Amino acid sequence: MENAKLMKTLFYNGRFNADGKRMRAVIDREVSNGQDRYRLWRKCGVPDHAYPQAENDTHLLYLELHGYLASLGMTEYSLIYESGRLPAIVELYGDMDGREKHLSELRKSEQAYTVEIPKALKIEGETIQRLGREPAHQADCIKKKMDEHISTYLEARENGGQTFPDFTEISVP
């Protein structure tokens, strides 16, 4: 079995894993953007998704944090998409407004919906896949996701629980 290791999860059944329950996991890979470095794990055995969209959409990824594993809430398939979407839009169009303007121009064509737009979306999808596979973009995506969860937690702590303290995925370091 692919060098599996018993690892403690940060959360178990939606709560902090105070009992130290473990799951069998295997290291998937390490990603870095030069400043931030993350070790990604996945659960061994039965896939998390019964109906995956691709081969790499079966197991959720976990981030190693101080000896615990915290769910990223996404598979490799979705990590690639989330990591590559914004860089692809910037590379192809400059920004989201540029993308909307480009698609708006394509809609004026007689073959907009049969040729032009599908061709543009195919190029966009290929660019997302190419850029989303780069470890630096994946590390940037993970860092952004962590920062959002930490900010949500800190806001809830500061306002005495008036807002929900995001405990379902990545939380405070």
Image: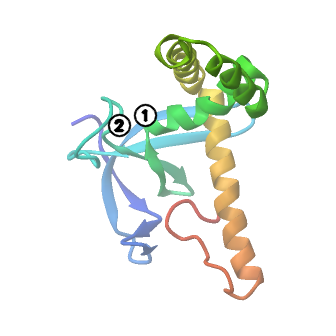
Report the number of discs: 2
Judging by the rendered image, the residue that carries numbered circle 2 is 57
**Left or right for 46, reference 127:** left
Residue 96 percent across, percent down from the top left? 74, 33
Residue 131 percent across, percent down from the top left? 60, 22
Q: Quadrant of residue 3?
A: top left
Disc sitting over residue 77 in the figure: 1
Asked if the residue at tag 2 contacts the one at tag 1, i.e. Cβ–Cβ closer than 8 Å, the answer is yes
Given residues 41 and 157, the one toward you in this image is 157
- Residue 32 visible in the displayed image: no
In the picture, the quarter occupied by the N terminus is top left
Residue at x 62% of width, y 21% of height: 107
Mark 2 neighbour class, 10 Å CA radius: few under 14, some 14 to 19, many 20 or more: many
Given residues 164 and 111, the one toward you in this image is 111
Disc sitting over residue 134 in the figure: none
Residue at x 75% of width, y 26% of height: 101
